[in-house]
Each structure stands twice: as C-alpha cells, then as structure tokens.
Amino acid sequence: MRWEDFRTSENVEDRRGEGGGFGFPGGGAGGLGIGTIVILCIIGWITGINPAILIGGAEMVNRQRAPQEQRQGSEAQRRTGAPTDQTGRFAAAILGNTEDVWKQVLPNQTGRQYTPTTMVLYQGGTRSGCGMAQAAMGPFYCPLDKKVYLDTSFFKEMEQKFRVKGDFAYAYVIAHEVGHHVQDVLGILPKVQRKQQQVDERTANQLSVRVELMADCLAGVWAKNSDDRFNSLEQGDIEEALTAANAIGDDRLQKQSQGYVVPDSFTHGSSAQRMRWFQTGFRSGQTQSCDTFRAAQL
C-alpha cells in the first residue's frame, strides 16, 4: 500500500509513554461505581468483548494503582498531531486517508457530512469515554467520546498470534474502526445500542454481528474509493485484508481458544462472513451496499 503518499491526519492523540494511568469515576479503592460499570457494559456490547472481562480488569487496575500514579496519569502532557515514529506515522497516514475519502464519499452517497474521529494511540492501557482501554481488548471505537483507541502493539500481535502481516492488513483494522465512526455519524450505533438494551443476550449478539460486518463492508468501501482516487493499492493488498478478516472471525477464534464453536455467542461474525462483507464493500464502493440490517443472509 502506498501509504507514504497519504496526507497525515492531525486528529491523533499520542498517549504512548504515559504509563497507563486510569481514572474511574465513582469507584473507591478496589471498587467501581455503578456509572463505570454501566459504561463498561456499553463498550462490551459495542465491541463484542465480554463485559465481565472489562469490569474485572478495571477492578484490578483500581486496586493496584497508587495515588501518585493517578496524579501522573491526569497531569501527563499528551502529544497531539502527527507522530514522528514509523508506526505512529503509519496510523496517522491511514487515518488521514480515511478522512479524505469519507469527507467526499459520505456526502455524495448519503447526504450526510463527515465529521472526523480522533485516534488515540496508547500502550498497555489508558482512559476512554467508555471506561478503561486495555491492550487485551484490541482496537475499538468509543461512541461516547467519538474516538478510535489503538494500542500499537496490536500490529505485532496480529503477526505473532494470528500470522497476519502487511501494511494493508493493519490499515484494514484501522478502517474497520473508522467504519464504526461512520455508523455513528449515520445514527446507526445509537439505535443499535438502545435496541440491545431491550433484548436478550442472543439477540443482542446478533445485532452486534450485523454492526461489525457493516464496519468490515465500510472498510471495503474506503479501500475501493481510496484506490480510485489516490491509486493507493498494490498487488496483494486485498489478499492481506482478507487474510486478516479470516484470522479474526468468531468461529476461528473460538475454535482456537476452546476447541469448539458456539454460533449464538458470535459478536463479530464468522471468518467467511467478515471476508464476504469486506469484498462486498470493495466491489461496489457504495455505502448503501453495506446495509447488513436489511440483508436476508449474512
């Protein structure tokens, strides 16, 4: 991918090196307030992460942090603008290209103006509008503060854990999270979130799958329009994205972790579904082709 030619986004908040300070409103030493628990449940629904894992991790961090670390976390000077290291430059360049593409595509195809998201780069852990951001959670989008959170070590984890590498595979991950922001701009995420709070767990999971597959499709729409406008793709790039989508399908991850598959617990979609919806977006280049909520078959 010719990412070096992209405009670098200034909407980057670089928290790497802060030391992972956390702040949880309403929580005492070792405990969490009800507001924090609700927020962690919301991010669990949206990202497909078990809320119990988020709550447990937050409680552990609350118990272990020292008052001095808390002060340091709140007083840390955060770098904004384009990072200067290779990984940071790459992330900022991909974000900048998504901005350039969606600022043109979204109004033309949907009549909605695109307001860019901010990307937070961190290592280990940091605070988000949705509660704790932790490396084990992977990249995610928080609709409460309109930011994408990315622990940059995830790229190395993709290579080591999932045997996935390549700049376009990494770009696909960023574009997927920006796809969630596009859903937010379109008003889709708030509607789904409200619906998930009214239904049983199985139905809530099914809604989550549709949200995630739509984000995969929107990543494909971005890739198609980026290539049409900037000639950004190189041979093998699409294969890299499909390899990544295949590696992080719910069925494959469950098979690897527990030896069997439970479709009712899927929150992101199977490997085949994730690859198919990315290809749907890439082939059409049209946002309208990504309406997974009206699709008879995922």
Image: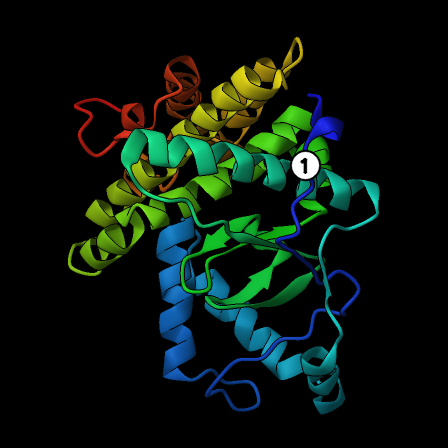
Tell me where residue 262 sits by quadrant: top left
Looking at the picture, which amino acid does disc 1 mark?
Arg
Q: Residues within 10 Å of mark 1 (few under 14, many from 20)?
A: some
Display colour scheme: rainbow
Between 257 and 296, the one nearer to me in the picture: 296
Which residue extends farthest top? 235
Tell me where residue 199 sits by quadrant: bottom left
Counting from the top left corner in percent of width and height, residue 86 is at 82, 40
Counting from the top left corner in percent of width and height, residue 282 is at 44, 18
Residue sitting at x 30%, y 45%: 186
Please identify the quadrant where the N terminus is shown.
top right
Name the residue tied to disc 1.
7
Residue sitting at x 50%, y 32%: 101
Please identify the quadrant where the C terminus is shown.
top left
Residue sitting at x 42%, y 56%: 50
Counting from the top left corner in percent of width and height, residue 61 is at 62, 75
In the displayed structure, 64 sits above or below 87; it is below
Tell me if 31 is positioned left or right of 214 in this view.
right
> Element type at marker 1?
loop
In the displayed structure, 34 sits above or below 262; it is below
In the displayed structure, 27 sits above or below 46; it is below
Asked whether the viewer can see residue 166, the reply is no
